[in-house]
Image (spheres, grey):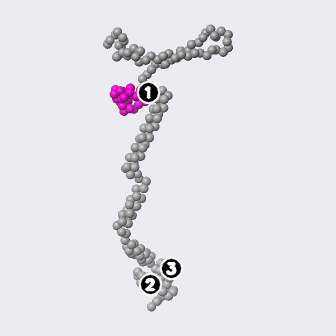
Amino acid sequence: MPGLCGVCVKATASYTCPRCQLNYCSLACYKGHSTRCTESFYEDQVRVELQSHRATEEERKKLERVVAELSNLGVASPEEEEEEEELEAEEKAEERLMALVAKAERGELNFEDLTEEEARCFHSELKRGVLGQSLTAWEPWWVNASIVSLDLDSLDDDDTPPAPSTTTLPTPSASSRAPKPAHLCCTPGREA
């Protein structure tokens, strides 16, 4: 039998609290009758609802992966860090090489510009003869020089100078050249 509202004591109670069995007349009276009673009721309802929806093993693992990814957000893995370091090192090495090439093209490259490791490598390649094989043979400029001859008699009163005639000296063949001495101090007729 409905009685008087246990909260406001003014209206007829139409409802009963599921927790404490108190009669009340409206939602306002239900919410105001006991926050501890209503809060625990809502908590129990949520808990029951969550327990009725148990996740499968696959769903649980998927959720764990998502949570792990979110917790590691912004943190690079060791493999990613190594790759970044390698790329940075390669970029620095390439920049250094380009700077050395630019110095070499300007004719400003010195042995002191090399690092200790590069200097050791240079000496090693030099001793093995690898650098000598990659360089072309040096020819003095005068071997391929041309001779310009002018006719001095034609320079008397003309305003326009005559066109010079150029003749290129024949380059000596390998057979006509004198054999190279074995040592710098060795010349024909003088041995070390």
Q: What element carries label 3?
A: helix
Alpha-carbon distance for marks 2 and 1? 97 Å
Locate residue 25, reporting x and y percent.
49, 84
Q: In which quarter of the image is the C terminus?
A: top left
Callout 1 crowding tier (Cα within 10 Å): few <14, some 14–19, many ≥20: few
Q: Which of marks 2 and 1 is nearer the N terminus?
A: 2
Locate residue 143, reporting x and y percent.
47, 17
Q: Looking at numbered disc 3 in the image, what kind of residue is underneath it?
A: Ala
Residue at horizontal 42 percent and vertical 82 percent from the top: 18
Residue at horizontal 37 percent and vertical 71 percent from the top: 54
Q: Which of marks 2 and 3 is nearer the N terminus?
A: 2
Q: Residue reaching furthest bottom?
A: 1
In the rendered structure, does residue 109 fall within the stretch colored magenta? yes
Locate residue 89, reporting x and y percent.
41, 41
Residue at horizontal 34 percent and vertical 9 percent from the top: 189
Alpha-carbon distance for marks 3 and 1? 91 Å
Quarter where residue 157 is shown: top right
Image: magenta residue range? 108-135
Q: Say which mark, if any, is on residue 28.
A: 3
Q: Which of 153 and 74 is in front in this view?
A: 153
Q: In this view, does 77 lie above or below 92?
A: below
Q: Looking at numbered disc 1 in the image, what kind of residue is underneath it?
A: Asn
In the rendered structure, does residue 6 fall within the stretch colored magenta? no
Q: Nearer the viewer, residue 1 or 146?
A: 146
| Residue, disc 2 | 16
| Residue, disc 1 | 110
Q: Is mark 1 on a helix, strand or loop?
A: loop
Q: Looking at numbered disc 2 in the image, what kind of residue is underneath it?
A: Thr
Q: Is mark 2 on a helix, strand or loop?
A: strand
